[in-house]
Image (cartoon, grey):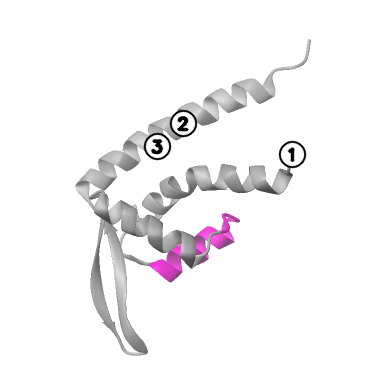
Amino acid sequence: MNLENTQVQMRKGILEFCILHIISRGEVYASDMLEELTSAKIMVVEGTLYPLLTRLRKAGLVEYKWVESTSGPPRKYYTITEEGLAFLNSLGLTWEELMNSTNQIISEKQS
């Protein structure tokens, strides 16, 4: 079994949750999301992020607006919708349950 593949799958499993959390804080540009995810060691590339943002938009969880830029083409800034906030809150509860369950299992001492 390949350790790196397993680590990538674990990170992918929480990517949507992390992206929604970042967007929930306010208007955000995709490259800022990439920077924050990378600094948190959740490695993601544009080829992964943009399709995920499109899926979230089509699902009604996020929306975007174009903002003119003085240094180049207009930028797309994302915000979370009310439906997205409800979805994020549900994911947050699931995350708490998973953390608690995982911590319970990994803290068990071998008999």
N-terminal of the pair, mark 2 or mark 1, is 1
Task: Say if 96 sits above or below 65 in the image.
Answer: above
Residue 59, image x, y percentages: 26, 48
Task: Say if 96 sits above or below 30 in the image.
Answer: above
Q: Amino acid at mark 1?
A: Met
- Label 1, on which residue? 1
Q: What quarter of the picture does the C terminus occupy? A: top right
Residue positioned most to the right: 111
Residue segment shown in magenta: 30-43
CB of mark 3 within 8 Å of CB of mark 2? Answer: yes
Q: Amino acid at mark 2?
A: Glu
Q: CA distance from mark 2 to mark 1?
A: 28 Å
Q: Is residue 41 magenta?
A: yes
Q: CA distance from mark 1 to mark 3?
A: 30 Å
Q: What quarter of the picture does the N terminus occupy? A: top right
Q: Is residue 65 magenta?
A: no
Residue positioned most to the top: 111
CB of mark 1 within 8 Å of CB of mark 3? Answer: no
Q: Nearer the viewer, mark 2 or mark 1?
A: 1
**Quadrant assignment, res 67:** bottom left
**Quadrant assignment, res 7:** top right
Q: Residue at x 57, y 61 (%)?
A: 39
Residue 63, image x, y percentages: 24, 59
Q: Residue at x 36, y 88 (%)?
A: 72
Residue 111 tag number = none
Q: CA distance from mark 3 to mark 2?
A: 6 Å
- Label 3, on which residue? 92
User: Of helix, strand and loop, which one carries label 3?
Assistant: helix
For residue 9, side relative to residue 18 (left or right) = right
- Label 2, on which residue? 96
